[in-house]
Amino acid sequence: MKKELTNKKAIWNQERTIKLTPRYIDALKEVILAEIKMMQNNNLHMSKEDWTWGEVVIENLSCSSGLSWTFGGEEDKPDGMVGKARVIIK
């Protein structure tokens, strides 16, 4: 089950979790917003409306694939998502 920052701890490995800092969460949101803006300005094959939101799911911070990024347009925006950027802890 996904939780949007209701539990600010993320998995580090099988035995440990680490507390996420507000600065880290804000930085992830800023990366999302920067990528949306960059793609709106440079993507020649898609319209700006195809880049209106993004999210990152934190799964396991001890591996390189521990962050999963998703972006899209209004028509495929996840239910319950408010704003342009969100961080979810799985």
Image (cartoon, helix red, strand yellow):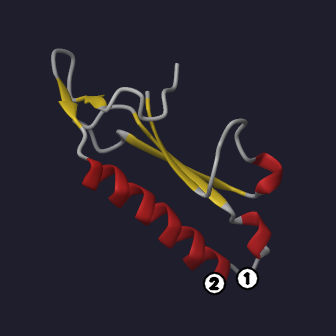
Q: Quadrant of the C terminus?
A: top left
The percent coordinates of residue 47 (x first, y second) are 79, 74
Residue at the (75%, 58%) spot, across then down: 73
The percent coordinates of residue 32 (x first, y second) are 49, 61
Residue at the (49%, 72%) spot, across then down: 34
Which quadrant of the structure image shows residue 43? bottom right
Q: Any mark on residue 9, and which?
A: none
Placement of 2 over or under 67, stated as above or below: above
Residue at the (83%, 51%) spot, across then down: 75
Which one is in front, 64 or 74? 74
- Which residue, given by chain and number where applicable, does mark 1 sit on? 44
Which quadrant of the structure image shows residue 44? bottom right
The percent coordinates of residue 58 (x first, y second) are 39, 37
- Left or right: 70 as drawn, with respect to 62: right
Q: State how far apart marks 1 and 2 are (Cα).
A: 6 Å
Amino acid type of the residue that numbered disc 1 sits on in the rendered structure: Leu
Residue at the (63%, 84%) spot, across then down: 42
- Left or right: 4 as drawn, with respect to 14: right
Placement of 60 over or under 46, stated as above or below: above
Q: Are marks 1 and 2 in contact (CB under 8 Å)?
A: yes
Amino acid type of the residue that numbered disc 2 sits on in the rendered structure: Asn
- Neighbours of disc 2 within 10 Å: few (<14), some (14-19), many (20+): few
Look at the numbered disc 2 and give the secondary structure of its residue.
Answer: helix
- Neighbours of disc 1 within 10 Å: few (<14), some (14-19), many (20+): few
Q: Residue furthest right?
A: 75
- Left or right: 58 as drawn, with respect to 72: left
Look at the numbered disc 1 and give the secondary structure of its residue.
Answer: loop
- Which residue, given by chain and number where applicable, does mark 2 sit on? 42
